[in-house]
Amino acid sequence: MPRKKTSVHKSAIIKKRGVPLADGIGAGKAWLIKTPSPKGLRKKTTHPRNHALEEGKVRHAIQLLSFVIDNAIQQITRRAGEVHAHIFVALKEVLHDPTVLEQIVKIIRTKNYSAYAAIKEEFEYLEKALGESSLHSMREMVGDLIEIKQGLLDALMNPLSLLQDEEPGEGMEARVIISEHLTPRLVLESRGKSIRGILAKHGGKNSHAAILCRALGIPAVSSVENIVDPQFAHATVALNGATGEIALSMAREDVSEYVKTGETVAESGGRQIAAPEQLQIFANINLSEHALQAIASGANGIGLYRTELEFLAAGKFLTEEEQAIKYRNLVMTMMGLPVVIRLLDVSRDKIQPILDTLDRDIDISLRGADFLEAYPDILIRQATAIARAGNLGTVKVLYPMIRNARQFRILKNIVAGIAKASGAPRLEHGVMFEMPSACNDADELFAEADFGSIGTNDLLMHLFNLSRETAAAEVQEKSQDPLIWEYIAQVARSAQRANKPLTICGEMASQPGFIQRFIDLGIDSISVDFIHVRKLQQLIYGPDGNRRHSR
């Protein structure tokens, strides 16, 4: 006897959870985006006489995706500044790499492949080749390739619009998009269509589309199991982009109450956070001008100033004088509150756009401390500028991507020597624990360092060999893995033995559910992007967010 197909009862409330991508709560009628399959488009091979036609489809798809990226650059620049738009510029550079188009055309001509099949084959080959690279910088490019491939296939399948309204009479009704993939094009097309949120089966937290959602204020959740199901086409949906919670109703009743607002109480495993007066909340900033927002947020100081983004914003390597002006302005604005200045954390995506401003070759495979050790003149220039700001307030220097105590000692001696020679007061020197090797060397490192900071994003990536662009779902899962907590606890124990302060940075620091665990480990400070400071204060300290500044 055949099994009867199961379906959800119309009155049922279905609860799901995915990976939170963009903060906010949204509710509305589900808008299930179906991927059309025009006749013959997915066909693998074609007749040789169609070569020109298939090549034309590829070029048109590239043109359309290029337009989407340009639009995204404009939106990000307008809402978040040019420095944040730079990752989209890098995406466009990959899209217009002439060798990629040449290879796709070659596949069409030599294998008689369709445009669809040729694009898939070329990008899957590139994804595999870079994914197996021994260089972390190369593996990080895989996410860009996946996004470009999906964007080009979308352009082939949907040359006009992804959001074709099937119910014109309800065009202004609040809606929540449900889609297989979260792409920049989908996000951009959702503007002006009363979209209250986006649910996707696939989409990374650090993907370009997720960044665009955050800039445009569109709540989004991805990695939702079985979400692209026809039975949800007429459901009422609510989602919480901060927690990943989702509720669906077949009866179109209000389901907003089923997703927590997260606005009044912070929980950790069902427990209220204990002794919150111990906790200091610092702000992460990208530009010195963000100091005003950090002050306004009520942060205890600057816990992480990503100086390399000043270089990207300027489009060049800054001179000593240009850096000194920015550092002095920042320290003066903070009016005595501590300022942690991270030395240049250079990586391929950060340095590539400004390489032409140098009159020599640079090894773009190097990152963080490895780069600083390889190019001491760049380190000396930055250290001198920092030392000039040391007379104006509490300045701490943070060393990125440190591998071991030997490397930290070499770099610290250079910076400390410059500070001493310039007559600046003693700077504090800290280690950023992002490499497993540094965590294993924590006792020796804290014997040399004045403080430490755990960069959870990169530590997760290195511990589990994850990619920033493609592994958001894994990162969400791995942040619960006992291994990452063993490493955090190991560093915390070393800090306590040395009686040195330790701060948590990265995505894990901004998740209220982890704060009690940090406190239990003896960690009494976190550092989060300044836009999250006030919200965390209200979650932890109550609606008024009252707290005490520590100078």
Image (cartoon, rainbow, N blue to C red):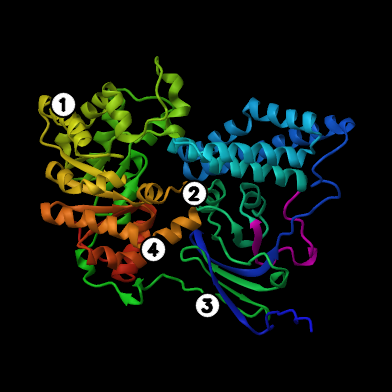
Residue 369 position, x and y percent, is: 29, 34
Which amino acid type is marked by label 2?
Asn
Q: Establish if 399 lies above or below 195.
A: above
Q: Earlier in the sequence, mark 3 or mark 1?
A: 3
Q: Which residue is mark 4?
A: 480
Residue displayed at 61% across by 47% down: 184
The nearer-to-camera label among 4 and 2 is 4
The nearer-to-camera label among 1 and 4 is 4
- Compared across the picture, whether 150 is left or right of 305 comes to right
Please report the bounds of the magenta region as a residue range: 161-180
Judge the density around disc 3: few (<14), some (14-19), many (≥20) Cα neighbours within 10 Å: some
Q: Earlier in the sequence, mark 1 or mark 4?
A: 1
Q: Which residue is mark 2?
A: 206
Which amino acid type is marked by label 1?
Ile
Q: Which residue is mark 1?
A: 418
Which amino acid type is marked by label 3?
Tyr
Q: Which residue is mark 3?
A: 258
Give the quadrant of residue 286: top left
